[in-house]
Image: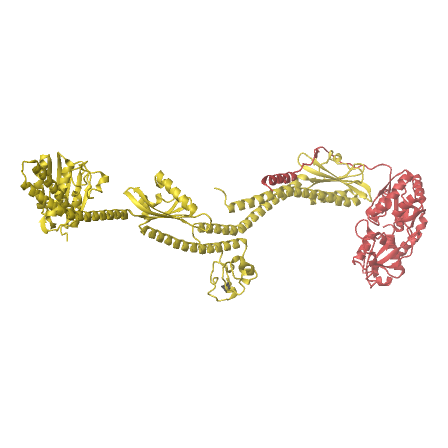
Chain colours: A yellow, B red
Amino acid sequence: MKPGFREKLLMGFFGLLLVQGLVIFLWFSHAMKASVLDEIKNRGVSTGTSLAVGLVEPMLAMDYLRMKVLMDETTRLGNDIFYTFVLDPDQNILAHTFNSGFPVELKRVNPLNGAGPSSLKLLDTGRQMVYDYAIPITVNNDFLGTLRLGLSQTRAEKVVNQVLVSTIIIILLAIFLAGLVGTLLVNPLIRSVKKLHDSSEQALKGNLDVHTAPTLDRNCWDIMACNREECPAYKNYHHRCWYLAGTLCPTCVEGEYAKKIQSCQHCRVYRKCSGDEIQSLAESFDAMTLSLRGNLSDLKAAEKILNEQKARLQTILDAIPDFISLQDQDGRYVSVNKAFCQILGKPRNEIIGRFNQDLFPPDAAALYNEEDRRILSTGTPLEKENQIKGPNGIKWLHVVKISVSQKTDRPKGLVCSGRDISMLKAVQDQLTHAQKMESVGSLAAGVAHEINTPLGIILGYGQLLLEDVNSEGQVYKDVEVIVKQTKICSKIVKDLLSFSRSNKSVVTDFDVHGALEEVIAVVEHTFSLNHVSIHRGFHGAPLSMKGDKEKIKQVFINLLNNAFDAIDTHGKIYVTTGSVKSGREIRISFIDTGCGIKKDNLVKIFEPFYTTKGPDKGTGLGLSVTFGIIKEHRGRIKAYSPPKTDKTLARGTQFVVFLPTDSN
Amino acid sequence: MDLRTFFLLCMALILAGCDDNEHAISVDLSRTEQVIFRETPDVITYAYLPQYSHRVSYTRHQALVRYLRKETGLNIRQIFPDNFDQHMKMVGDNKIHISFSNPFIYVKIARRYGAHAFARIVEATKKETFRGQVITRTDNTAIQTLGDCRGKTWIAVDPTSAGGYLFPLGHFFSHGITKADFKEIAFAPGPGGKQEKVILSVFAGKYDLGTIREGALDVVAGKIDVAKIRIVSRTPTYPGWVYAAVKTLDNKSLDKIRTALVKLDFNQKDHREILEAANFVNVIPAMDADFDSVRQLTGRLGMEMDQ
Ligand code: SF4
């Protein structure tokens, strides 16, 4: 682990002290050693010199005893004085302090020539080192002799070493004390820095309610005795008043910190309460968190409002059945509503951030991109009806695209709104179809009325002619053809009248099953000749309804004939009934195993005169008449090819008729 | 400063703190010898009566001794007896061959050991005679005249001092003051430097009055404030200091010495230096009779010359 600020500071502190101590020790110990040695040497010189002065009188008096006594006393006084002796100018020993004879070699090692300066030599006696001083004994510059004095250097060294040891101890003690004082001084600093660090961590974690600066003994309201509870600084123990905006002191300058602090520096409160740099740092940190907290709560409030508005907008957008999308200036989808998602069959998150090419087939995407580019560059809105193929089939959309303008030159994006008009289209188609049928019906009814009378006359005259002519002759045969064809025309006219509902209806209560059986009984034999069988699947209970039984039977005949025509030979017709909508409706289904109807033709089959059969194979009015009768009874008819309820059949057609039990 | 520079600086400081060891001379202290001091033969010893310290005696007479040695070719050496008695005794013991003493001592050694005067000096005052002085502290108003000295404490140089005791004692006697009139008569203690000791004792106020040889105040002029010393009275003059030779000194040597001494000429530069150091201006021949005035004084005072 890396050392912390405190460790670094203390390490640096101690390191410096240690280096300083080392340098002081080595440098000053040398100086001290030299000075102590110098001192010792000087002491030797001064002792020797004063002894030499004292020796003058005894030497002059040739008083050997006094000389000896003086030297002995000097030797005894200084316990590091090893020896003393006196030589006359002829190098004769006059007196010495050696107890057992004078060492011969000693005399010559440090000679002095006359009354010159004293001489110092270091002697090695084998046992110890000795500083040997040779000091001239003089009177008025007359050389009387030489005083030699031996000072133990070993003892001097001992003294020096003692001094050095003392120095080391003192230095160590000083380092220890300095370290102790340093630690005591550093600790509050470290504590403050740590507190600052903790507070900043807390702030980073989102707790902006930290109090880093120490509390004050006396606060501004105490010092100023203001009693202004409305002031933001009043009883605010954690923030200094000069950091707070809007304080009420007469000397406080309006505004934030930068403006205020100028005036605060002359204030009594500031002078009393402002601390050192660390305290100032802690205080400004507190002020910073305070202002951050204020800003943050403003931001949060704004964010909340924005989120609410966004959610509201999205709800509104989603509630709109039209699809709405917003693209940025690069064509990226930035916002879409629920309807848009449904149209594309993708969740919102798969649409946001994508481009046209990510969402639509290449051709459509290229077209949309081109449209977008044109709108963005020209600013002209686009309005169109669009047919799209979605997962739920083909849809018709009414699309409006407009550019979102902004103050700069470039538009900011595109808003596209579209409405699903498939229903409208279908209704339009149905309306068109109904109108067409209506017109055809009225036309047919008009034509039928006009044709019916002459046709009746032709038929009457024809039949009268048949009675009048020979039945074997050619005329008879020709008239017979006329009568036959006239009858066909009459039937067409009758059908047309039925289609246009111009016939009068006879409403009765009847059983649908009975009506069905009556019809089947008529056709079943004929069908069987062509190997077409009819299979019944009737509802368990009788299904009675109110309506024109004959017209309903006409419907059943038409549908059975249609089925037979589709089969041609060899096939089956399934007739089933049922009750739906809680017995309010009767459902009758006709399924044939015939050739089936093409999907495109399915919508046209109820149009009058529409037929897929060859010439002379029908009038094309069967299904139109059927459609008209069912509509007259407020019922519905649906055609499916292949059949919807019988999935075993790959071909064939199913007609399902829904008839209300009470058409009124 | 980066870490490297700091390190180099530390090393430089550390290295600067180191030094070389001193060179030592080996000495064998085990070989020893017994010291015997042998006196040089044919030495003529010259001693100055130790009225001052040996250092002063040396300073005053060493140049003269050197001159004599050179002038006579004799092996003359100055020696320094510790006190007057020792001086006299050494004369008696033939350890001092040439004695330079005051006339009082001279009359004593002449009588006791047969020493005989052969020259005497002319004082720095250019007189052949000298005298004593009675001194007191300037602020001692109780002693204004000689008579005021009665009942006071008196320090004298030495019982054998001429200017420092004998002449003042005679002076007091002439004024009707005897030893018994003093509260105390003390003598300067210890060897040598006695004139100075008397002055210093009076200066320190230890004694009311002191008696010294005329000129002694000049010796202490640099050591104390002599203005604080007042001369109460001066004694009559007596013959000055005298050179005496012991009986055993051969005449030839004595002649050479006398001749050399008398030859000293104050007008001659090298001689003047010698004479100035010795604090006299001339040496003149003398004979025993020149000191009879002193003998008379001692007689008057009833002093025993043999003791
Ligand atoms: S800033 Fe002034 S007015 Fe406000 S509480 Fe402190 S002393 Fe009172």
Q: Is residue A37 left or right of residue A454?
A: right
Q: Is residue A176 left or right of residue A135?
A: left
Residue A446 drawn at (x, y percent): 18, 49
Residue B82 drawn at (x, y percent): 81, 47
Of residues A616 and A641, the one drawn nearer to the viewer in this rendering: A616
Of residues B269 and B149, the one drawn nearer to the viewer in this rendering: B269
Residue A372 drawn at (x, y percent): 39, 44
Count of numbered tags: 0
Q: Quadrant of residue B141?
A: bottom right
Residue B44 drawn at (x, y percent): 87, 40
Of residues A126 and A159, the one drawn nearer to the viewer in this rendering: A159
Asked whether residue A566 is in view, the answer is yes
Asked whether residue B91 is in view, the answer is no
Of residues A565 and A608, the one drawn nearer to the viewer in this rendering: A608
Q: Is residue B251 left or right of residue A531?
A: right
